[in-house]
Image (spheres, rainbow, N blue to C red):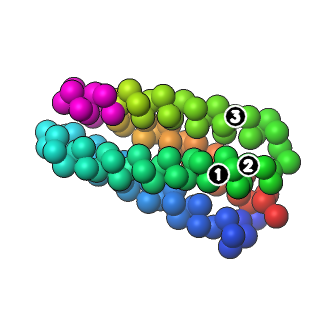
Amino acid sequence: MRQPSSEFSEYLTEHQHIEQLAEEVVATVRAGDWSQCGRAWARFVELLESHLTTEEYEVFPQCNNSALVDRLISDHELFRRRLEQTMRAIHEKAATEDEILSLVILIREHGELEDELLYPTMP
């Protein structure tokens, strides 16, 4: 598999950072530390939303595989709905580890898809 150009390698690093922040959120939910959870969640959402928006406006337009781009955009829309649902659950102190882990798994799988199919094909 071809490695992404240095222009796009920063997105791979962001994928790792997003996962680290997500794991921090899971740990705070597991500990029942809702105050810390809210702060960790805010950092996670800020980075993830910035990443998604940048991909949509800067990366996806450069991709020639419209079916892949459609799939990735659909994933982004799902993430935004799930982020909103989970945020409400965190504010209500009702978020569960399973709820957040399922979102983390979706985001991880999406990042792997991008890492394998999108970024290596970028100019």
Quadrant in which the C terminus appears: bottom right
Instruction: Give the residue type that dot 3 points to.
Output: Arg
- Mark linked to residue 71: 3
Q: Secondary structure at mark 2?
A: helix
Instruction: Give the residue type that dot 2 points to.
Output: Phe
Measured in 3D between alpha carbons, the distance from the residue under mark 2 to the one under mark 3, in whole angstroms, is 11 Å
Measured in 3D between alpha carbons, the distance from the residue under mark 3 to the one under mark 1, in whole angstroms, is 13 Å
Q: Position of residue 83 (x, y in %)?
A: 42, 34
Inspect this view and state whether residue 31 appears: no
Q: Position of residue 37 (x, y in %)?
A: 23, 45
Q: Secondary structure at mark 3?
A: helix
Marks 2 & 1, CB-CB < 8 Å contact: yes
* Boundaries of the magenta span: 87-97
Q: Horizontal placement of 69 versus 20: left or right?
A: right
Which comes sooner in the sequence, label 2 or label 3? 2
Q: Secondary structure at mark 1?
A: helix
Marks 3 & 1, CB-CB < 8 Å contact: no
